[in-house]
Image: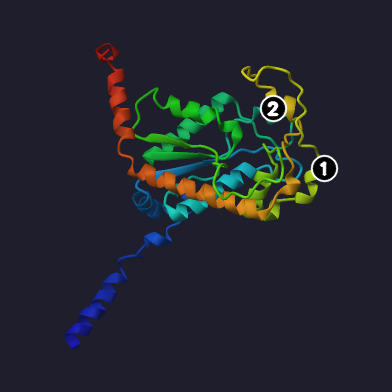
Amino acid sequence: MKFGRSLFLMALFMLSFAGPVISQSSLSAKWEELTAPDFVQAIHQSQGVCVLPFGIIEKHGPHLPLGTDLLDVRFAVTNAVKQEYAVVFPEYYFGQIFEARQQPGTLAYSLSTQLTLLQETVSEMARNGCKKIVIVNGHGGNNSLLPLFGQAQLASQRDYVVYVFGLPNENVAGRPALKTPFDMHAGEVETSNMLIARPDLVHQDRAGQQSGADLHRQTLPDSVYTGIWWYARFPNHYAGDASAANKELGEFDQKTWSREIAEALKAIKADDESLKLQNQFFEDSKHPLDTKQ
């Protein structure tokens, strides 16, 4: 008995100098909340998968905060990584929003700055062990920017892969029916989602202070595009009617979005082909005349 007790005391003595034992389950997923030692463990636990929630700062009608897209996408990602662990990059809102420059509070960076900053951000993420970088889009104005950025990753060789996860899928079985016939921006859907993500920032009583109707100030074929199309239709930067927003719709959409992000993260963790194919592509690109025709 004395021998056993001596071993027990010796073990306690050694543990007192070993430093704190970090439980994987207690690790924060948020990059900015991790200590340096925890960050190393978080990268290992996430298998090098890191998420960049991509929002924007723009007007969302007269009733929602300027950071709605940023707050919304981070809420969805935060819940997703509880289901499938990954490291989440800090707040990022340096996207495409030229169409709202006439509205107060909008932050619209030059295109060159957007692309340069995003490239340097993912490069720094990769240097810190994020070899699978998932950009989760939370803003419709990035729908062209992010696929372009993803395609641009083939311009030069790199040791990481960028994945782009688009806006949430709204065609889901069991989804509560919309009460409004038209909804594009700051209307029933986005307001419902914010009633779940940040209800304290929703001023639904102000939803009728401005019109979210389509003004149809352009007459062009559907096949013709011009950058002024949004301003021509929705100069108030409000498209829809937020008075119909409700928590039932918001809760369904938020849960669906988070689940789909988590499923994507799981698939990305299991993806062993993309980097191999990317490396083969870069090797083939060095001698295109040798590519079999």
Occupied quadrant, residue 73:
top right
Q: Which mark is residue 230?
A: 2
Please tell me which residue is depicted at 74% across the width and 33% down the height of the picture: 103
- Dot 1 lies on which element? helix
Q: Is residue 106 left or right of residue 79?
A: right
Few, some or many C-alpha atoms within 10 Å of disc 2 (few <14, some 14-19, many ≥20)?
A: some
Q: In the image, which disc is placed on residue 209?
A: 1
- Nearest the viewer among 154 and 239 is 239
Q: Quadrant of residue 216?
A: top right
Residue kind at label 2, given as amino acid type: Trp
Residue 194 position (above or below residue 1): above
Image coordinates of residue 100 in percent, x first then y, are 69, 31
- Residue 98 rendering spot, x and y as whole percentages: 65, 27
* Residue at 54 percent of width and 45 percent of height: 172
Q: Residue furthest right?
A: 209
Q: Is residue 77 in sight in this rendering?
A: no
User: Which residue, as the protein is rendered here, is positioned at the far bottom?
Assistant: 1
